[in-house]
Image (tube, grey):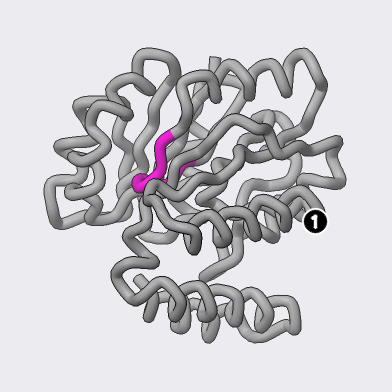
Amino acid sequence: MVSVICPVYNEEKILFENFAAFQKLSSRSELIFVDGGSIDESRKIANRFGRVLESKKGRAVQMNSGAISANNEILLFLHADTTVSKDALAAIEAGIIENGYAGGCLTQRIDKKGLIFRLIELQGNIRARLTKEFYGDQGIFVKKSVFLKIGGFPEVPIMEDVLFTRRLRDFGKTVVLPDKIFVSARRWESRGIIKTFLLYNWIILLFRFGYPLNKLKRLYDDLR
């Protein structure tokens, strides 16, 4: 069985929108929400689906807290604005138990029609397959024993997902499963699709050239 860890902070709107998806997920997994101090109804809504923990705010801190408390050997990290295809959990279990992967991610699909969204997700999926560096909205999964050996997500302001999956490659084979993770288009729509796409790629480029993470976080926050 898979333990699903979902960090939340003032996400009542998207939790309510994904109500049916979380309800189904809770029947097939241990679902753990880790709240970073929400002042809206996030905790109340999340409590209807699974266990709710409280943590200091920060995606890495929240995910680490949830992972440590998880009861299963397979961990899947989901953002509140993502949902997974119906066979994804079984595919993750098969990948780790039967095929021996240390971890991996799912194939991203943005939940809006339009060629631009197909191109954005195509770029991300190709990058993940080539580099074996995965982003949080791609549904990172990992064996808990491996997660603990790595030391969890580095508690940095941003890019904890990439830094973690770079380490993950040292502990065994990783994979991008064909099973889908559906991602809300809200971040692209709120600031403009092209502007957001270009800014994300600019942030990634700066990261690869060693730009300070605290400054990258400020750029990223401007997109949220």
Q: Position of residue 194 (x, y in %)?
A: 46, 76
Residue at point 54%, 35% (across, down): 180
The quadrant of the rendering that contains the C terminus is bottom left
Q: In this view of the protein, which residue sits in the foreground, 120 or 19? A: 120
Tell which of 104 and 37 is nearer to you: 104
On whether residue 158 falls in the magenta region, the answer is no
Magenta range: 78-83
Q: Is residue 87 above or below residue 186?
A: above
Quarter of the picture containing the N terminus is top right
The residue drawn where x is 53% and y is 19% is: 87
Under circle 1, the secondary element is helix
Residue beneath disc 1:
131
Q: Residue at 72% of width from left, 22% of height from top? A: 95
Q: Amino acid at mark 1?
A: Thr
Q: In the drawing, does residue 183 fall left or right of residue 99?
A: left
Residue sitting nearer the eye, 79 or 54: 79
Q: Is residue 165 above or below residue 51?
A: below
Image quadrant where residue 108 sits: top right
- For the stretch drawn in magenta, what is the main secondary structure? loop
How crowded pointer 1 is (Cα within 10 Å; few <14, some 14-19, many 20+) is rated as few
- Which residue is painted at 37% across and 51% down in the image? 112
